[in-house]
Amino acid sequence: MSQQPGTPPRLGHEELVAAQLETLATAHRSYGLAARVLFFGLDLVYGRERSLSKFKVLEIVARVPYQAWEQVAYIAVTHVYEHQTMARRIHDRVVEARAQQDNEQYHLLILGELIEREGIDEGRLRFYWLPQALAFAYFQLSWLLFVIRPSWSYRLNADFEDHAEHEYMTFVSEHPEWETTPFVSEVATDYGQFDALADMFRQIGHDERVHKQESLERLSEPRFR
């Protein structure tokens, strides 16, 4: 079965460990101003320490660019639908963007399960209302940048995904107990089966790498072709 565009491949244990080591040995991207402001704000509000709750906030925001690109693509189709070749290419972008945001959605659902299972108490303001406001603002920014110059929106997303990739892989190294903690989730059938929680988080980190690479591949492209 061919891999659906926008859906990262599922890796085995050895591949996931290798991916983690590769990420930890690779320098961060040189982030742009918007990304640096975003990361600074997240650290200011949620602290620099990595936590399940902070990653949940990241995942609420992570879906936003793909939603923005999907919306722009749908609008574009209404203007070029008579040109079948171009319309089909734009539709393919819709399919890819939808798969990417679905992948990020699974991350969010899994984190929500873990937070609930561990009985973590989250304040409504910091972990519901503020993330919603941040996601709304980030959507507008991603949409506007894409309309003005698509490469700007892709670059911002690449920065975000690079940050997430490094954070997840580092998070795993901070929790050696996860190597023997079973991964149990209601969405495991859809997202993937893993023997240990550590591998599940490594997979998420690798997903973010794939999304980063996909955005970087789009940098030199026009809006749609």
Image: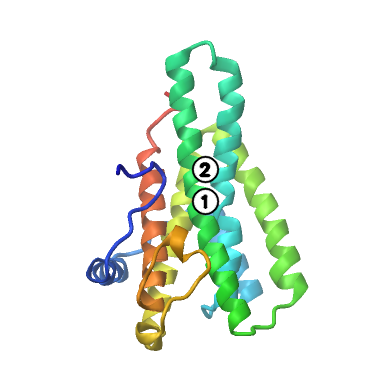
Q: Secondary structure at mark 2?
A: helix
Identity, as a three-letter code, of the amino acid under mark 2: Arg
| Rendered position, 128 above or below 117 | above
What residue sits right under mark 2 in the picture? Answer: 98
Question: Is 165 left, or right, of 17 in this rendering?
Answer: right
Identity, as a three-letter code, of the amino acid under mark 1: Asp
Q: Is residue 63 visible?
A: yes
Name the quadrant containing residue 123.
bottom right
Report the quarter where the N terminus lies.
top left
| Rendered position, 205 above or below 46 | above
**In the image, which disc is placed on residue 57?**
none
User: For this rendering, which residue is in front, 26 or 172?
Assistant: 172
| Residue lying furthest bottom | 177
What residue sits right under mark 1 in the picture? Answer: 102
Q: Position of residue 178 (x, y in %)?
A: 40, 83
Q: Position of residue 202 (x, y in %)?
A: 37, 69
Q: Position of residue 53 (x, y in %)?
A: 60, 75
User: For this rendering, which residue is in front, 83 or 151?
Assistant: 83
Question: Is 26 left, or right, of 48 in this rendering?
Answer: left
| Rendered position, 20 above or below 100 | below
Q: Residue at x 72, y 57 (%)?
A: 133
Q: Residue at x 38, y 43 (%)?
A: 4
Question: Is 66 left, or right, of 137 in this rendering?
Answer: left
Q: Residues within 10 Å of mark 1 (few under 14, many from 20)?
A: some
Q: Is residue 29 visible?
A: no
Q: Residue at x 35, y 83 (%)?
A: 179
Q: Residue at x 55, y 57 (%)?
A: 105
Name the quadrant containing residue 175.
bottom left
CB-based contact (under 8 Å), mark 2 and mark 1: yes
Q: Secondary structure at mark 1?
A: helix
Name the quadrant containing residue 70.
top right
